[in-house]
Image (cartoon, grey):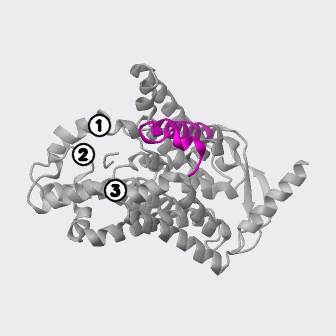
Amino acid sequence: MRLDVAGRGLALLGWLLRPASRPWQAVSLAVVLGICVSTSLRHNWGSDNAFVVKAADTLLAGGSPYEDKRFLYLPSAVLMAVPEALLPTGVLRWVLPVVLSGLLAFGWWCAMRLFSVPTRSRFAVLGFAAFAIAYKPYVNLVLIGNWTAISAAALPCALLLAHRARWVAAGVVIGLAIAAKPMLVPVALLFLLARQWRGLAAAVLVPVGLSLAGALLMPSPTLFFTKTLPFLLKGQDSYALPWDASPIAVLPRLGVPEPAAVLAAGVLALAGLWAVWRRWSRPGGDEEMRLAETACMVMLAAFLVSRPSFDHYLLVVLPLLFASAVRAGSAPCSPWFWVAVVPQLVGMPWNWFLGGERRAFKDCFTLCVLAVTLMVGCTRPGRGNLVSVRTAGSVRAEEPVDAGSRPAF
């Protein structure tokens, strides 16, 4: 029976790795463009992006973007938002969803390349379309226009460059993403573990340099430290609370004392960092898995304690985790991975009961289960990996081997 199940699994994997026909490619493109069009027609499109555009408008008018307490990005982000501020609203309405979808598609493509999955395969083409139409946070991200899409594109791209020993270029990519939105700051730990000091310097100096340039162009840049940063460290206010999926925010809503909630989230995050160290200290075997799992675990540990932590944050790690499904022992091979992801699928019955202000309960469940699932995988010794000879559009010979020892933020 086990051999039969394994044989069917390999047959399905072989089918997924064969090239997708042109009609299927057209269907996948139509799905993504359909999401773009539908979000452009919604009255609340770009609600998060509006904070960034407003900041750029304020800068162009000679004011300080940090007068608005809900603009929570670095000064460099204001410079990056100027082109958006110069576009007419009617044009931006149609361009923004396409750009965000393009960024998410680029991140997916980089994740496929990292794991040597043929980019024209059914897995790559149909997988992205299914992800876009079924995973509700994807649609939410495109609708609100949040700049999380930049981080979702940057992390797989940086890991692909790192895998090719181009750590400085990877640092530049991470630095540019941080300059737009400081979400990928925890990835600096990956450069420390790899002892890639020049790459780390690039990741630090790029956002610092751009932020200094932005600060010199705006009045009262110190408001970032005196007004914005304290507001952010407090987890913002009641405006963000209904959508904050951090255990620190969700557990008190369920009756848990706030100190206990902070302790629980902190313990989980520290366990995640321990798992990062364990995973990185097992070199050899599948280096792509090592890079991806370490980076994803770092980000999930950060999401557990960050305030706020929204549902679309997981789009930064999920393309990498889904792409790793072609390797034995990866997170998608665990049923707990799907226990975490399934509640987020469009059309699930509980979406009617956990929508609106109660949606964060479901998002917190997904975050915690996904983090623990990856944590267990990272600390499991002697996992098997698939060593494959990869050729586009063909089934590969596989052999298991042992591995070595709602605001704009």
Report the residue at 51% width, 52% height from top: 136
Which one is earlier in the sequence, the residue at label 2 or at label 1? 2
Locate residue 252: give its quadrant.
top left
Q: Are marks 2 and 1 in contact (CB under 8 Å)?
A: yes
Which residue is labeled 1 in the image?
A: 236
**Horizontal side of residue 234 vs 151, given as left or right:** left
**Residue 167: percent from left, percent from top:** 46, 60
Q: CA distance from mark 3 to mark 1?
A: 21 Å
Which one is earlier in the sequence, the residue at label 3 or at label 1? 3
What amino acid does circle 3 point to?
Answer: Asn
Locate residue 393: give its quadrant.
bottom right
Magenta-drawn segment:
346-373
Which residue is labeled 3 in the image?
A: 44
Task: Sort mark 2 into few (<14), some (14-19) or many (20+) by Cα contacts within 10 Å.
Answer: many
Which mark identifies residue 70?
A: 2
Give the SS element for disc 3.
Answer: loop
What amino acid does circle 2 point to?
Answer: Arg
